[in-house]
Image: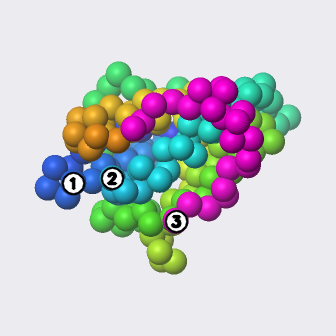
Amino acid sequence: MQIRQLQIAHDALQDRLILRVSTQADEEFRVWLTRRFLRELWPHLTKLLAQPQNSIQLVPGAEAMPTPPSFEQPFLDDKATYPLGSNPLLTSEIKVDTLADGSFHLTFREGRERSFDLGLTPDLLQALCAMLRAAADQAQWSLDMAYATPAATQASAGKIAPHLH
């Protein structure tokens, strides 16, 4: 999946964040994130951010991302299709993996029904975390969303739990 745009917005009526991912193939994936879920997820994301940056190597014959993701333009959804349906997936579980090339794979699950796989480079993970912090602040959720310091990360020295419920 080639990511074109990411957006995170607060829905005041639902009191949830909605993650919208637009692809180069004009698909849009929508995922709800609750305050409680984000509070539990955040420490795992900061541990991922604190990992040493591996140089990303492309598979022979593979091309670099043809169009970099856009963070300056409004979110485009005029001709999007919705592979998961138009109702956002309500995340109750996530699986986080660090891949050999230094990128990350997040699988958002809604119970045992729908799921959404999101692959992120270190730069996209950093952008996602910045957007999550800004949206949680806008929602006035009063979450401690500080980035983990290298010392705190080394002190925990444990592996990141592959599943978060």
What residue appears at the point 63 percent right and 32 percent down from the top-left corner?
152
Which of disc 2 and disc 3 is earlier in sequence?
Answer: 2
The residue that mark 1 highlights is: 15
Q: Quadrant of residue 75?
A: top left
Q: Say how the picture is coloured.
A: rainbow
Query: Of the residues shown, which amino acid type is indicated by label 1?
Result: Asp
What percent of the width, then of the height, locates residue 4?
46, 36
Q: Secondary structure at mark 2?
A: helix
Q: Residue at x 72, y 26 (%)?
A: 53
Dividing the picture into quarters, in which one does residue 58 lie?
Answer: top right
Kind of element beneath mark 1: loop
User: Is residue 79 among the parts visible in the rendering?
Assistant: no
| Residue found 41% across the figure and 56% down from its top | 37
Q: Which mark is residue 165?
A: 3
Q: How many marks?
A: 3
What residue is shown with label 2?
Answer: 35
Q: Is residue 146 magenta?
A: yes
Q: Earlier in the sequence, mark 1 or mark 3?
A: 1
In this rendered view, identify the residue nearer to me: 150 or 131: 150
Q: Are marks 1 and 2 in contact (CB under 8 Å)?
A: yes
The boundaries of the magenta stretch are 144-165
Mark carried by residue 5: none
Q: Is any part of residue 140 visible from this angle?
A: yes
80 or 124: nearer the viewer:
124
Q: Quadrant of residue 7?
A: top left
Q: Is residue 102 above or below residue 53?
A: below
